[in-house]
Image: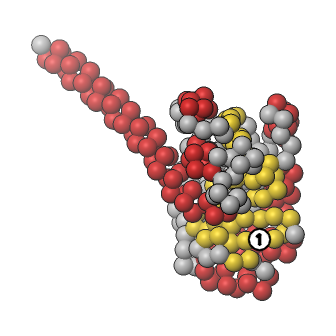
Amino acid sequence: MTCNTDDVAEGLSERLLKCLEELDDLKDDLDIWTDSLEELSEIEDAFEVDERNRLHGKTILDVGTDCVKPLYIALKFEAQKIIGINEDLSPYSFASDIEKKTKLLTKTKIRFYDCSLFDEQNLKKILRKEKEDIFDFILLSKTLHHLRMGECIAKERDQKHKCLPDEESCIYKFEEQKIFRRLFQYGKRVIVFEAFYPQGDDEDKIRGRGGYFTKEEMKQMFEHLSEYYRVELIKPLKYRLAKSKLKKIESELRQVDFVCFYVEAK
Ligand SMILES: [Zn+2]
C-alpha cells in the first residue's frame, strides 16, 4: 500500500514538473514576442522609409533573428523581402508558421535559415538561392555582442579567469574593423540595437561569443566607426556621430542601458 501511494506521488510530481517546464517554455515564447515589439519601437527610425512610411522594394538581412521582428516589420513597413539567419533556430518553434502563413497578411517574403554570419560558404549558398547579393539593410538586434571572434579577454574583467576547454567563462575580443568590414559585404546600411548590462549574465552566450559590451568597448567601437563610416545615432538621441561628438556619446552611454544607431559607407 505504502509502495503504491509512493508511486502515485512520484507520478504526480513528475507530471507537475513536466507542466512547469512546459509553462516555462511558453513564457519564453511570449517573452520573445513582447521583447521583439519593444526592440522594434526603438529601431524603426533607423530604416529609410518612403513618403508612405513603407519599405517597398527594400530587402533586409536580419542577423541573429528572433523570427518575430521580420513579421512585425513586414506588417508595418511592407518590405519586399526579409531573410533571417540564426545559428540556432530551434528555440523559435513558430518560425516555419511565420514563414508560411505570413502570406495571408503581407506580400513581404520572409525566409529563415540556420546559418551563422561567420559561415561564409553556407551564407553565400543561401544568397544565391534567394537571388540576393547586397541587402538594403542589415539588422543586428541584440546580436552584435555575439559577433566576438578575437582572443579571450575575460582576464581583463576577472583576474582569476582561466581559459578552460569548454570556454564557458571566456569572452572573445570584439574586433570592430573585421566585423563591420564583413557586414558591409552583405548590406548597405547596418542597423544596430544593443542593450548592455556589463554586470549581467548573457544567457545566449556560446563559448566566448557573447557577453554584453562594456561602455569601454562601445567607446572603442564608436571611435573606429566614426572615423571610417557615417554613423547616425537613433536612440537615445538622434544625431550624426562625428569624431567631435565622441565625448557626448560617452556621457550619454553612462545614463542609458541601450543604444540604437546605423552605419553606412561615408
Ligand atoms: Zn578565456
Q: Residue at x 62, y 36 (%)?
A: 89
Q: Residue at x 72, y 43 (%)?
A: 80
Residue 104: image quadrant is: top right
Is 258 located above or below residue 49 in the figure? below
Helix, strand or loop status at disc 1: strand
Label 1 CB sits under 8 Å from any ligand 1 atom: no
Is 228 located above or below residue 107 in the figure? below
* Residue 67 seen anywhere in this rendered image of the structure: yes
Is 120 left, or right, of 80 in this rendering?
right
Classify the position of the C terminus by image quarter: bottom right
Closest to the observer, 48 or 178:
48
Q: Residue furthest left?
A: 1
* Amino acid type indicated by mark 1: Val
Q: Number of callouts in the render?
A: 1
Q: Residue at x 50, y 57 (%)?
A: 38
Is 210 left, or right, of 148 in this rendering?
left
Q: Which residue is mark 1?
A: 231
Residue 132: image quadrant is: top right
Q: According to the image, what is the colour scheme of the structure?
A: secondary structure
Classify the position of the N terminus by image quarter: top left
Q: Residue 22: x, y in percent? A: 38, 33
Closest to the observer, 143 or 104:
104
Is 157 left, or right, of 29 in this rendering?
right
